[in-house]
Image: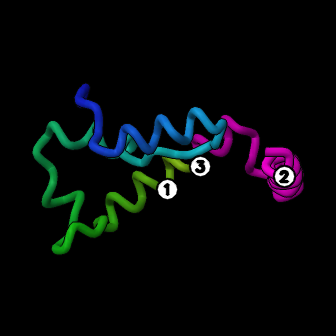
Amino acid sequence: QGKAPRYSPLLERFRSKGYRFIDLQGAIDPYEPRDASRELFQSGGHYSPLTNAIVAKFIVTQLKEWDLMDAEKVKEALRVERGRSARR
């Protein structure tokens, strides 16, 4: 926590382009100080069922903040974004 991730340049690029994204590290960071990596990750670095549940909650929270839980609102946001991308 507190340390910039290795992929910070990618996040900055997304921000500079105005892309919306969800950085899932923010979902996991609060749990890592407890040395829970065995509980959070399976062999090969895959998320455990616990981590999948944490990440799913995190994504839902972000989608709610963006008001994108309704299918029609998602379609509208896509339409707007596609129009914005076409003008670049």
> Which residue in the rendered view is the most extreme toward the front?
88
Front one among 85 and 33: 85
> Percent x, y for residue 3?
23, 29
Residue 56 numbered tag: 1
Residue 60 numbered tag: 3
Residue 46 numbered tag: none
> Percent x, y for residue 23?
45, 44
23 left or right, relative to 16: left
| Secondary structure type for disc 2 | helix
Q: Amino acid at mark 1?
A: Ala
Q: At 75% across and 40% down in the image, what residue appears?
A: 67
Query: Mark 2 against mark 1, which lies toward the viewer?
Result: 2
Is residue 69 a member of the stretch shown in magenta? yes
Q: Amino acid at mark 2?
A: Ala
Which is more N-terminal, label 2 or label 3? 3
Q: Amino acid at mark 3?
A: Val
Query: Mark 3 against mark 2, which lies toward the viewer?
Result: 2
Q: Gap between marks 2 and 1, in whole Å? A: 31 Å
Discs 3, 1 touching: Cβ within 8 Å: yes
**Magenta span:** 60-88
